[in-house]
Amino acid sequence: MGKRKSSAKPPPKKRMDKLDTVFSCPFCNHGTGVECRLDLKNSIGEAFCRICQASFSTTINALTEPIDIYSEWIDECERVNSVEYDDDD
């Protein structure tokens, strides 16, 4: 009698790299000045610079990550700058 064939092991799962939680400040350009905090209980996300004290707050949900808050801050800065630039014309 022969042995039973063992089934092949499934391939190992790929690990996701951790996303950053510390970013560069859009105002003072300090490399690691901006820190993001998530308050899921109150649904508020806050990004603030420890160097120049600039801050940004937004509403969040359960899937929000610190990079999302920082990206929204950068987008808002660009939007404000483009509106100011359009007013100068």
Image: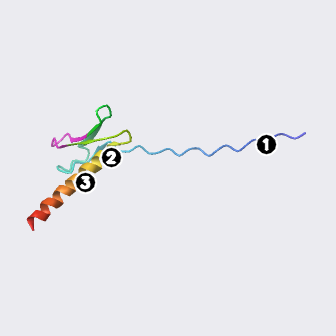
The kind of secondary structure element at disc 1 is loop
In the image, which residues are magenta? 46-55
View extreme (left): residue: 88
Residue occupied by mark 1: 5
Label drawn at residue 75: 3
Identity, as a three-letter code, of the amino acid under mark 3: Asp
Rate crowding at label 1 as few (under 14), some (14 to 19) or many (20 or more) other CA atoms within 10 Å. few
Q: How is the image coloured?
A: rainbow
View extreme (bottom): residue: 89
Residue occupied by mark 2: 67
Q: Quadrant of residue 59?
A: top left
Q: Quadrant of residue 48?
A: top left
Q: Earlier in the sequence, mark 2 or mark 1?
A: 1
Report the residue at 41% width, 43% height from top: 18
Rate crowding at label 3 as few (under 14), some (14 to 19) or many (20 or more) other CA atoms within 10 Å. few
Identity, as a three-letter code, of the amino acid under mark 2: Ile
The kind of secondary structure element at disc 3 is helix
* Residue 25 on the magenta span: no
